Amino acid sequence: MLIELESVTKIYNKGRPNEVKALTGVSLTIEPQTMVCLKGASGSGKSTLLSIVGCVFPPTSGRASIAGKQLSRLPDRFLTIHRRETIGFIFQQFNILPGLTVMDNITLPLLPLGVSPRERRKKARILTEQLSITHRENFLANQISGGELQRVAIARALINNPPIILADEPTAHLDSRLSMEFMSIMNDLRLAGKTIIIASHDTLVTDHPQVHHIVGVKDGRIHVP
Ligand SMILES: Nc1ncnc2c1ncn2[C@@H]1O[C@H](COP(=O)(O)OP(=O)(O)O)[C@@H](O)[C@H]1O
Ligand SMILES: [Mg+2]
């Protein structure tokens, strides 16, 4: 099993007055090479769930096994290493740095790994070619279109060749054409062997024919409608 959560709970600010129980008793398994959608209202716990699957933090209680590692057993430093090797993250706002070139944005995750500039460019070139943005490599990120920005975000998520791609409300700032294009790229990646998990309440995503499983999230619990 690629991803296995068992009775996962996440409490933010535990024991403090601002304590929030974001996830309660979440059990979930995700097979390799599937496309899964986490569907739920704002505040239901989708991003928190993605953060646990994305090895950002371990659950407060319960077990989370991601690509063969039990998160609670990993010291912080190893959690970070595991995340870098395993997870590609695509955010709602894409989190692209506007003052950097497309090339520098894409290769950013390689900096802490000590990959040489030449090797970084080589890896990025393969992705910019796949995603048809090679002609934008030297543009500043604030000089390209929304659709190109989305592709830069996808390329950056792929640069470490992670088996798992997580996307948090990726279509929130895209029109319907670009949203469908996003889903089509995700499907291609899945066919190429990736496992894709998308948190969204956009029906273009949740009703997409290539989504294998829809996991309903409600008030921090998996919700079977
Ligand atoms: N860093 C945080 N600190 C405290 N509470 C948080 C934090 N992140 C999220 N929450 C709370 O946890 C709950 C679930 O949030 P979230 O996972 O972001 O839901 P969704 O992504 O579905 O909107 C919400 O009540 C939210 O306010
Ligand atoms: Mg969210």
Image (tube, rainbow, N blue to C red):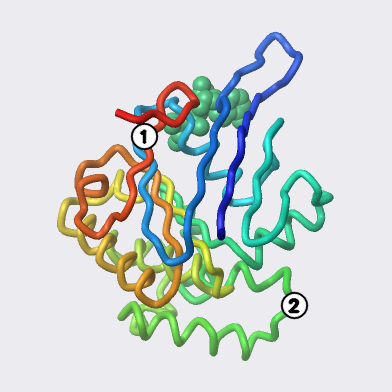
Relative height, residue 168 to residue 153 (above, below)? above
- According to the picture, the residue beneath numbered tag 2 turns out to be 114
Rendered residue at 53%/62% (across/down): 88
Q: Amino acid at mark 2?
A: Gly
Q: Amino acid at mark 1?
A: Gly
Relative height, residue 108 to residue 207 (above, below)? below
- According to the picture, the residue beneath numbered tag 1 turns out to be 216
Q: Position of residue 225 (x, y in %)?
A: 29, 28
CA gap, disc 2 and disc 1: 40 Å
| Label 1 Cα neighbours within 10 Å, binned few <14 / some 14-19 / many ≥20 | many
Q: Position of residue 8 (x, y in %)?
A: 62, 34
The front one of 118 and 101 is 118
The front one of 194 and 63 is 63
Which quadrant does ligand 2 occupy? Answer: top left
Q: Position of residue 87 (x, y in %)?
A: 57, 61
The front one of 215 and 199 is 215
Q: Quick one: label 2 or label 1, which is nearer the N terminus?
A: 2
The front one of 38 and 28 is 28
Relative height, residue 175 to residue 157 (above, below)? above
Q: Quadrant of residue 155?
A: bottom left
